[in-house]
Image (cartoon, helix red, strand yellow):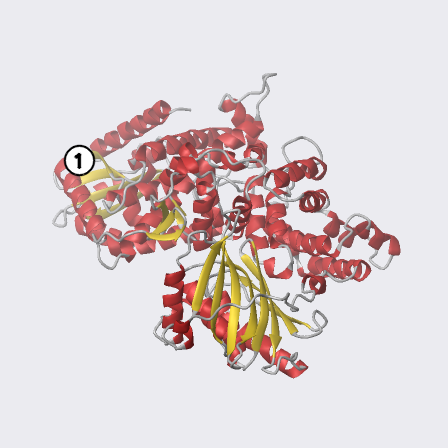
Amino acid sequence: MTAAERADRTAAADAACKAAYTAAGAPDVGVVLVAVGGYGRGELAPFSDLDVVLVHDDAVDPGEIASTLWYPLWDAKYKVDHSVRSFTQMLDAARADDRVALGLLDQRYLCGDTHLSLRLRTALLADWRRTARERLRDVGAMSRRRHESVGELAHLSVPDLKESAGGLRDGCVLKAVTATWLVDVPTTDLERCRRALLDVRDHVHTLSGRAVDRIQPELWSPLAEALDLLKDDGTPDAEAAQRHVRSHGRRVAHLTRLTWRRVATVLDDPRPGTVTAPVTVVRGVAAHGPQVVLDGTVDPAADPVLLLRAAAVASEGDLALEPTTAAELLRDCPPLPTPWPVEARDLMVRLLAGRGLLGVWETLEETGALEHFLPEWEEIRLLPHASVIHRFTVDRHVVETCVEASKLIRRVERPDLLMVTALLHDIGKGTGLDHSIAGEEKARSVALRMGFSEADAGVVATLVRWHLLLPSVATGRDLDDPVTLEEVTSRITTPVQLELLAALTEADSLAASAKAWSSWRARLVGGLVARAAAVLGPTGAEERCEDRSDLPQLPQVKVPLAVRSGNQAAVVQVTPHDDGAGSSVLVLARDRVGLLADVAAALGIERISVRAARAWSQTEPDGTEWGVSEWDVDSESLDASQVRERFALVVAGKADTRRLERVPADALAPVVVVRPRASRSATVLEVRAGDRPGLLHQVLTAVAGLGMTVRSAHVDTVGPQAVDVFYLCELGAKALSETRAAEAAHAVRAVLSPTG
């Protein structure tokens, strides 16, 4: 089936309509017959209806023509979707219903009054463009509802060529959006994909013998034969047919998402035509409206991590990674070294855990950028699942698993391993072997390449090997039988592995389908995990919070006269690390409750990421108490005077710290736990929350508000999650009581919780 055959079908239908119009004695003036919808576009499939409208001037009565015109078409066995409307009724119908408007934009003259047809087309287009800003929001919402209801053509087990995201209807909507002149769409690329999908629909009609848009599983092989997609032995290649259809659908879906983002930018612009400057977010990467761009300060040819940095910023901020930006980085950035640097590994985890992962990952796929750091992806790209329980193709299922896993990172000590395992858990599919066994070594190899240690790569490999273990044992074995428990604990041998596997199982199941994670299945798996945890012991959180509050003997910091006299708020010294990876910032000021919170605010306002901190007191011979704190930060070129000035503004109450105090409404709830046995001389508070510049400031301010001091803070960022440990004391340097410890935990939890 080709465009030429569709043109032939359209020409035959046009001839039949003209003959019927002539036979009905219709006039040449005041009345016109037009084709709309797919027939108007000349895209008749073998079993398509003829969508036609008899339009007449308001002052003209079409008379009997309106009832006799259709009989010859019915006699010719055409299925006709017809209506009769006046010129004004046509305009009113288009204004009242967006669906009608979209169909009428494709109207095409058949016979009758050519002037009336031209007037109608001009009026419809003018009306569409004049009201575009009001109507496009509704059209976009209508499209999103359809996508949510039907799903995505590229990844559905039974794709719908017309209604699904990336289907033929989206192609028509994009053409209508282009007609508004508000945004542009790559029409050449769009038309190429649309015509390929039209060819497929023609074959599906012919093979089914009726007008259908859904490709049932049994149609893939005959469809492959019709498309001349054959294996080396000459038999139809059903998998190739799926990839052919799904790749074009994915491209249309990608163009659709990019277009609606651009539309949103235009519609939300309070001052149309005003040019705003990009805002740098991280080194080399800026946010410009709803998209991520390069800020021009970094040469891509000298920074192999820049592509991942831009992708992570886009994913975390739910911004668009512009295809042109991704393509430029793919072209100019050198390959990542093996193993990856720590920054690249952390950025990959942040990318996977970001709320905008789906759109960013799609851009990376469409531009070929995924091959830059994950060439194994090609093996599962658009690969259909053999199991009917899965609603998506393998690649989309993997991304959906990452989306679900990102909601569970507060439950686990190693969110970085959870996210990478979610990405790799099905990487063995497409090999023709047991995917768990084949995926084990693939996952280990990828994890090592990403820069994980041998031990961490072993955990990832183990989780991939046994990612189906918990549901299969929980639903098919007697949980009270000791042999059942041994089957789990002989393979998953540490508390951390068990914790990760439980989260991965839930994410994997939720990504497969709603039925795959029923409350019954969740209870069974939860019961099995609890039994295994009793055997394997605690997760090791107490060990992670081991006593680190006893500080080594530290040299006295000289207090300058300017600080003694009060003319200067603090001493700030910056010492770059020998390896060039960050700096040490030493701050000295008069000791008081809340001092650390103010230093954290100064660093946060400057968007300086803190990796660790410790604090101690220094007593001068005259009895004056000075507070000293040392901060390990990730900046190599920090200006000490700028930090000192910012600190002075914070102390004076003149710095705007509101940005640091905001918690995103969609942020995950924090986990705040008191570790009573982790220290003999202080109370240890562990905090897991989304990493952001204001986190330390919020925690330290909450603690200071209760009159407590912080002996030391140990900051660790694992992917998108901060895992921070604080050693708290009363003013008299003693540990907190149980009541006070609970009060501190409640206060910290309150300031870090999203408020909606």
Give residue 425's position: percent from left, percent from top.
64, 43
Quadrant that contains the N terminus: top left
Residue in front for this viewpoint, 418 or 33: 418
As rendered, which of 406 and 715 lies closer to the eye? Answer: 715
Q: Secondary structure at mark 1?
A: strand
Disc 1 crowd rating (10 Å Cα; few below 14, some 14-19, many 20+) is: many
- Vertical comparison of 645 with 490: above or below: below
Q: Amino acid at mark 1?
A: Gly
In the shown orientation, is residue 491 left or right of residue 166? right
- Up-down relation of residue 618 to residue 189 (above or below): below
The residue lying furthest to the front in this view is: 621
Percent of width and height locating residue 281: 39, 53
Residue placed most toward the observer, 425 or 165: 425
The residue sitting at the top extreme is 233
- Above or below residue 701? Residue 264 is above
> Of 349 and 124, which appears nearest the observer?
349
Give the labeled residue for mark 1: 112
Confirm whether residue 408 shows in the render: no
Q: Is residue 208 visible?
A: yes
Q: Residue furthest right?
A: 482
Where is residue 334? Give x, y as percent: 46, 33
Q: Residue at x 64, y 51 (%)?
A: 509
The location of residue 475, given as percent across then percent down, is 76, 53
Q: For residue 26, what is the image quadrant?
A: top left
